[in-house]
Image (cartoon, rainbow, N blue to C red):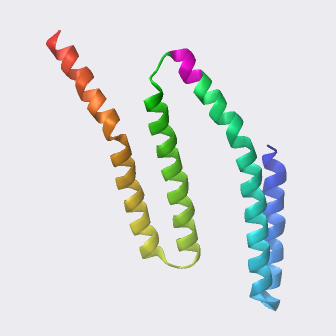
Amino acid sequence: MNIIAITGMCIIATIFIKLFDKINKEYGLIIVLGIVSFILLLVLSYISPIISAIEELFSLSGIDNKYLVIIFKAIGVCYLTQLGCDFCKDSGENAIANQLELAGKVSLLIIALPLFSELIEIVKRVITL
């Protein structure tokens, strides 16, 4: 993935959006939707190889795959929460964005509960030695 090209596209799109905002805000919205969709599709095309590489590393390490599922869920919650917060903040709804952040943090704690349980079990085994 060429981040320089993506950054350039985003800067150019932002310039066009600012120019069209003076003429007609709907044109700017169309540009935003187009560039966001394009970048999202581009990024999604790189996710599958990344997931495969991480799965291979986990299988080679001998770590249980249930932890990998927890990690992927946590990453998904983080990205989804960030996307929603950015959208709310861009729309001027900071209070909603703050509540969404709180909900994302609580979701992460819920997802991580099995890890905390496992950690407690490890500590118990170490203490009884």
Instruction: Say left or right for 3 vs 73.
Output: right
Q: Quadrant of the N terminus?
A: top right
Res. 66 image quadrant: top left
Which residues, given as a range, are shown in magenta? 57-61
Q: Quadrant of the C terminus?
A: top left
Residue 84 place in picture, x, y as percent = 53, 65
Instruction: Say left or right for 36 vs 94.
Output: right
Q: Is residue 62 above or below residue 35?
A: above
Residue pictured at 54% horizontal, 72% vertical: 89
Residue pictured at 76% horizontal, 85% vertical: 26
Furthest toward the bottom, the residue is: 23
Q: Nearer the viewer, residue 22 or 40?
A: 40
* Secondary structure mostly seen in the magenta stretch: helix
Residue pictured at 50% horizontal, 59% vertical: 81
Residue 53 place in picture, x, y as percent = 65, 28
Residue 17 place in picture, x, y as percent = 79, 77
Res. 126 image quadrant: top left
Residue 100 place in picture, x, y as percent = 43, 65
Magenta stretch encompasses residue 72: no
Q: Is residue 66 above or below residue 80?
A: above
Q: Nearer the viewer, residue 97 or 44?
A: 44
Q: Is residue 74 above or below residue 27?
A: above
